[in-house]
Amino acid sequence: MRNSELQLNIISPEKKLFSGTVSSVVIPGIQGRFGVFPDHAPIISSLSEGEITYNIGGTEQSIEVKGGIAEVIQNIVTICVI
């Protein structure tokens, strides 16, 4: 993983939904949507219902979620969704 990338892991109680390197991710936090880019400050946030979008090589992909929790630390974004 290069310094310009994030490791993104999206999991649900049933299965792993996505695991890979991305250049950015936008998360539906309970206080509003927020973007995560490389070298983002550590954060833990509850999620509201919405869409997680992430960019892989210039292509945007998304996953609809009903809620969950996200953690960002040292360029690793872990999102547990419901």
Image (spheres, helix red, strand yellow):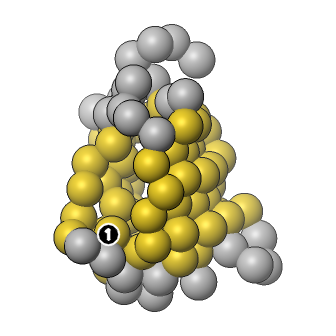
Question: Does residue 43 appear to the left or right of 49 in the view shown?
Answer: right
Q: As rendered, which of 28 and 15 lies closer to the eye?
A: 28
Instruction: Tell me where residue 11 sits by quadrant.
Output: bottom right
Residue shown at 55% from the left, 37% from the top: 73
| Residue at the right extreme, as displayed | 14
Picture coordinates of residue 19, whole percent (x, y)? 64, 47
Residue 65 appears anywhere in the view: no
> Where is 15 relative to 16, above or below?
below
Q: Residue furthest left?
A: 32
Quarter of the figure with the N terminus: top right
Q: Is residue 1 above or below residue 13?
A: above
Q: Which residue is mark 1?
A: 28
User: Is residue 80 depicted above or below 59 in this figure?
Assistant: below
Q: Between residue 60 and residue 69, name the one nearer to us.
A: 69
Residue under the point 39% across and 24% down:
39
In the picture, the quarter occupied by the C terminus is bottom right
Say left or right for 69 vs 41.
right
Of all residues, the one furthest to the top in this rendering is: 2
Sort mark 1 into few (<14), some (14-19) or many (20+) by Cα contacts within 10 Å.
Answer: many
